Amino acid sequence: MSDGLYYSEYIELDKILNSQHPKSFTNMEDGNDEMLFIIIHQAYELWFKQIIFELDLARNIFIKGRINDNTPDMSNAVYKLKRIVKILELLNQQVSVLETMTALDFLEFRNHLLPASGFQSKQFRLIEVKLGLRMEQRHKTEYYKHTRPGSLSETDLQDVSKTESEVTLKQLVIQWLERMPYLQEKYWVGYQSSSTENKFWSDYRQAYQISLSGNENDRLAEFDKVFFNEGRGDISHKAMQSALFITLYRDLPIFQLPFDLLNTLSEIDELLSSWRYRHFMMVRRMIGVRVGTGGTSGAGYLEGTLSQHYAFREITEVATFLIERSKLPELPNVLKEKVSFNL
Ligand code: HEM
C-alpha cells in the first residue's frame, strides 16, 4: 500500500459497516426492515456523540468563569450550539425515514428486540443531563434510575449518574447572566427615571403594567416574583433580569451575541421537543398504545415527557415579560457608550 492515509481506514469504515447484525434474519437477500431499524439507531447515536462533543466544548468555554462578550470565546460557544441546532433539525427529519416502515413490518422483528429500546440510550440521557434537565423536572422522577431488564446497564447508569453531578450548561449560563455588569449603578449615571429607587426596573415594571390586558392582572405579581424576588425555576432574579435586559436591548451591538446565545438555547429545547413529538407520533403508529419494550406505558409516557422536558423553559418564557420596542425606557448615555462598538 502507498504511503499516507487511506479513506476507509481513517474513518474505520470496516468496523462501522460490519456492525449491523439483525436478530430476525441471517440471509441478506431475504431480509426485512430490521436493517433499516439498526442503521437508523446507529446514525442517531453517531449524531448524539457529536452533540455531546459540541456541548462539552461549549461548557468548557463557560467554565472559564470570565467570558468577555466581545472575544471569540462567546462566538465560539454560540457557534457550537448552533451546530447542535442543525444536527437536531436533521434528527427530526430522520424520523420520516423510519416511518417508511409500517406497523406490520415492525412486528416481523419486534419480539426479537425485547427488552432493548431507545430508552436505554445512555447518550440521549447524557445530552439531557449536560444541557441541564434535572431529575425533579422530569415527567416521572427516578424513572431511569434502575437496572431492571429494559433499563440502563450498571455501567451506563454509573456514567449518567456521574454526569449528573457535573456542572451543566444551564448552570454555567445562569452564572454568566449573573455576572453581567451592565445593570451596575455606575452605568446608570444621568438616567432619567420617574422613581427614586431601583430606577430602571421600576420604570420597566410600570410600562409592563400598562401593556397588560384586563385578564392578565396576575402577571404583575409574577413579574415582581421573577425579577425582584425569587426568580423563576432554576434561575435567580438577578440572572432573569439580565436575560430580560439582553432580550429587550438586543439591537445594541454588545447584546447581539448574548441574545443569539439565549435564542439558540430556546431553539435547542424546541427542537428536542419536536423530536420527542415526532418520536411519540411514530411510536403510536408502530405499536399503538402497547407498553414499551423498555417497560414504560409506551406512548403515554412519551406524551408526558413532551410537556415537561425543557431544559431552558425559563429563558424561553422571558417572552412573557416583554413590551414593545417603542415603549422601552431610554438608556443613559454612559451605558449606551459602553455597549456600542463605535461610539
Ligand atoms: C419503531 C421505532 C420505535 C419505537 C416503536 C420506539 C418505541 C419507544 C418506546 C415505547 C419508548 C418508551 C420507553 C419504553 O420502551 O418503554 C421509547 C423511548 C425512547 N426511544 Fe424509541 N422507539 C422507536 C425508535 C426510536 C429511534 C429511532 C430512536 C433514536 C435513538 C429512539 C430513541 C428513544 C429514546 C431516546 C427514548 C427515551 C425517551 C425518554 O425517556 O424521554 N427510538 N421508544
Image: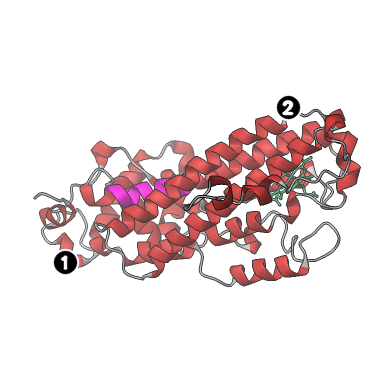
* Side (left or right) of 228 relative to 338: right
Quadrant of res 242: bottom left
Q: Is residue 61 left or right of residue 146?
A: left
Residue marked by disc 1: 186
Residue 23 spot, x, y in % from top left: 86, 45
Taking the view exactly as shown, the residue that stands out farthest to the front is 1
Q: Residue at x 71, y 33 (%)?
A: 98
Q: Residue 236: horizontal and vertical position, in percent?
A: 43, 64
Q: Name the residue rendered at 25%, 56% in the picture.
A: 200
Range covered by the magenta-colored residues: 256-265
The numbered mark at residue 227 is none
Q: Quadrant of ligand 1?
A: top right
Whether residue 191 can be seen here: yes
Callout 2 amino acid: Thr
Residue at left 21%, top 47%?
253
In percent of the image, x 67 and y 51: which residue is there? Answer: 15
Q: Is residue 317 visible?
A: no
Residue 195, by quadrant, is bottom left
From the viewer's side, name the closer residue of 224 and 67.
67
Dot 2 crowding, Cα within 10 Å, few <14, some 14–19, many 20+ = few
Report if the beta carbon of the residue with label 2 is closer than 8 angstroms to ligand 1: no
Q: Which mark is residue 100?
A: 2
Q: Is residue 302 above or below residue 165?
A: above
Q: Position of residue 234 (x, y in %)?
A: 51, 62
